Amino acid sequence: MKIFDTHAHYYDGRFADEGIDVDLLLSSLFDTQIEGIVNVATNTENARTVIEMAKRHKGMYTALGIHPSDVSPDADIDSEIEKLRFMLTDKESKAVALGEIGLDYYWQPYDADLQKKYFDRQLTLSEELGLPAVVHIRDSHGDSFDMIASHPKAFGIIHSYSGSAEMAREYIKRGWYISFSGTVTFKNAARVASVAESLPHDRVLVETDAPYLAPHPMRGKTNHSGNLVYTVGKLAELWNIPYDEAVKITTENAKRVFALD
Ligand SMILES: [Zn+2]
């Protein structure tokens, strides 16, 4: 079995800036180490690019949603939600999740009320459609948890997890999965590693968040799904199991949450 990258942004301008031919890169990744990739949109504009890219690669799926840092007071929330609903229910879009959505109180300036409005509406949509949500949480652990707890039928993935072990267990109890990015391998992130170590293996996923968050020893470089060997390797080490077993567990988990085969 090969590795499943549950979260990447292959349309990001950083690939072109580095002179990387993304389609060529993806073809070689699918030929060698990678079983599947979810290409994640951050607004209704790049969602179109995300979908076009997924059509060109059999193993690529999409997550479509409006990121907290992409919400705008000038947009009409009702029409944005309807655009999303249309794309998510179109079979051609290869959508397996609604995302990424959430709350980000790190990037300044931000409008917490507007972010919450979009988060709430999109969680409701994910409940209606029965699709998993992909949630981004930055400097907003309390508010994000409260919002998710107020949507008991919602389920999905807390992406690039950075919270506490206690909170992770609360999400798991509510049917959510916890996804770890390259940060779990960082030398100065022992806390993230200890959270990963403590969780039930059947609720853990891996992701790149490519082109960002490359794992050690590739930290700082342009990230791609092939670097997941380091992330999965770290989980295998933390769980004290063979590497191949960590690949199998995390890929099976990904297929379960995205309802693939
Ligand atoms: Zn992301």
Image: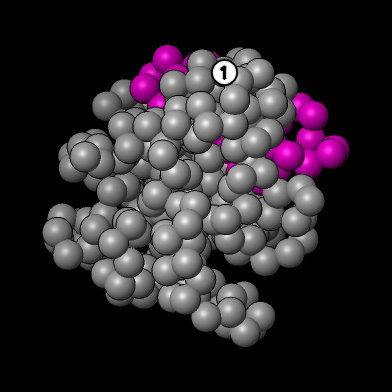
Residue at 50% over, 20% down: 201
Does residue 252 belong to the magenta stretch? no
Residue 25 place in picture, x, y as percent: 51, 71
Labels in figure, total:
1
Residue drawn at (42%, 69%), measured in percent from left and top? 27
Q: Position of residue 174 (x, y in %)?
A: 39, 19
Pointer 1 local density, CA inside 10 Å: few below 14, some 14–19, many at least 20? some
Examine the rendered structure and indicate whether residue 84 appears above or below residue 161.
Answer: below
Q: Amino acid at mark 1?
A: Leu
User: Which residue is more in the foreground, 193 or 251?
Assistant: 251
127 vs 66: above or below? above
Percent across and percent down for residue 78 are 25, 60
Which residue lies at the image location 35% right of the left edge and 72% below the top edge?
53
Give the magenta part as a residue range: 169-192
| Residue 170, magenta (yes or no) | yes
Identify the image quadrant of residue 73: bottom left
Q: Secondary structure at mark 1?
A: loop
Find residue 239 and report its image quarter. Answer: top right
Residue behind mark 1: 199
Left or right placement of residue 149 versus residue 178 in this view: left
Residue at x 31% of width, y 47% of height: 97
Question: In this orientation, does residue 69 appear?
Answer: yes
- On the question of residue 148 being in view, the answer is no
